[in-house]
Image (tube, rainbow, N blue to C red):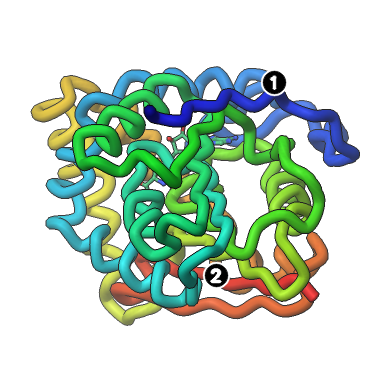
Amino acid sequence: MYTVRFFKAMKHSEQQNQDSKTTDFGYEQVPIDEKVNKVGQVFSSVAQKYDVMNDLMSLGIHRLWKKVAIELSSAKAGQRILDVAGGTGDLTKKFAKIVGPTGHVILLDINYEMLTAGRDRLLNQGIVDNVSLCLGNAEQLPFPDNYFDVITIGFGLRNVTDKTAALRSMQRILKPGGRLLILEFSKPVLPGLKPIYDHYSFKILPFLGKWVANDADSYRYLAESIRMHPEQSVLRNMMLEAGFADAEYFNLTGGIVAIHRGYKK
Ligand SMILES: C[S@@+](CC[C@H](N)C(=O)[O-])C[C@H]1O[C@@H](n2cnc3c(N)ncnc32)[C@H](O)[C@@H]1O
């Protein structure tokens, strides 16, 4: 029997910063409260085509990026792992195999369509016993303090309205000695890569989105949201400010993607 638990959001001290009244949604400025709905529309719209688009857009390279993130997590049998913004469950699936029957993986996402697409996919692959699902917001994670050995957030953080709240929330529920892995698009550092990458992102990507998923706008948002996301060193500082004892990053594919790793003391 598949374990599906929809945890009720608990109240914690991490509250969204209300100092500024607008925030970015791609290149657009929108009222803070509206971003979550707009991001929700994007992922509800792409949920059914998400996996095929991921392979197509990255020529399958996202699988390698995820493999590196899993290796950097040093996850082990018997551990408790949270996959925040886990979507269709790529990381969850791999962690479920690593932690085995004595461990547990929770796939958390704010979007019902993405979460159910993940559930169906895991079910079809026979990954059942050590995985639970949680509909929840990264900014207010509904778990006790010091609970997880490893937390990942893969291509999720740039979509979160209050990234500081999410980082604090993840730091709070990590066990001392636990680690957070943030896998996210970042700033290209390889000389000459930026113009090619920009052309691909703003010309080819929306075309692919229109052609395969009949949704150019969502893939335009993807390109814009990547540019608005804090670059490598800024995100590292945000992690330290959120309470991580140490933080480092690894550039992949010339910095198109970076993995940040933070430790809790
Ligand atoms: C690009 S997908 C990544 C899915 C998966 N981690 C992967 O790497 O394939 C981003 C996911 O972040 C989720 N998300 C966006 N904002 C969120 C939030 N505040 N809390 C939790 N999940 C969120 C979206 O619903 C979506 O499923």
In which quadrant of the rendered view does residue 17 lie? top right
Residue at mark 2 to residue at mark 1: CA–CA distance: 27 Å
Q: Residue at x 28, y 28 (%)?
A: 120
Dot 1 amino acid type: Asp
- Secondary structure state at the residue bearing disc 1: helix
Residue 40 vs residue 188: left or right?
Answer: right
Residue 1, image x, y percentages: 38, 28
Residue 261 vs residue 58: left or right?
Answer: right
Residue 200 numbered tag: none
Characterize the local packing of mark 2: few (<14), some (14-19) or many (20 or more) Cα atoms within 10 angstroms: many
Residue 52 vs residue 246: left or right?
Answer: left
Characterize the local packing of mark 1: few (<14), some (14-19) or many (20 or more) Cα atoms within 10 angstroms: some
Residue 33 numbered tag: 1
Residue 14 vs residue 200: left or right?
Answer: right
Quadrant where the C terminus sits is bottom right
Q: Nearer the viewer, residue 133 or 108?
A: 133
Residue 135, image x, y percentages: 55, 27
Q: Residue at x 34, y 59 (%)?
A: 97
- Secondary structure state at the residue bearing disc 2: strand
Residue 94, image x, y percentages: 33, 58
Q: Is residue 237 above or below residue 172?
A: below
Does the image show residue 237? Answer: yes
- From the image, tell me which residue sits under label 2: 260
Dot 2 amino acid type: His
Residue 264, image x, y percentages: 75, 71
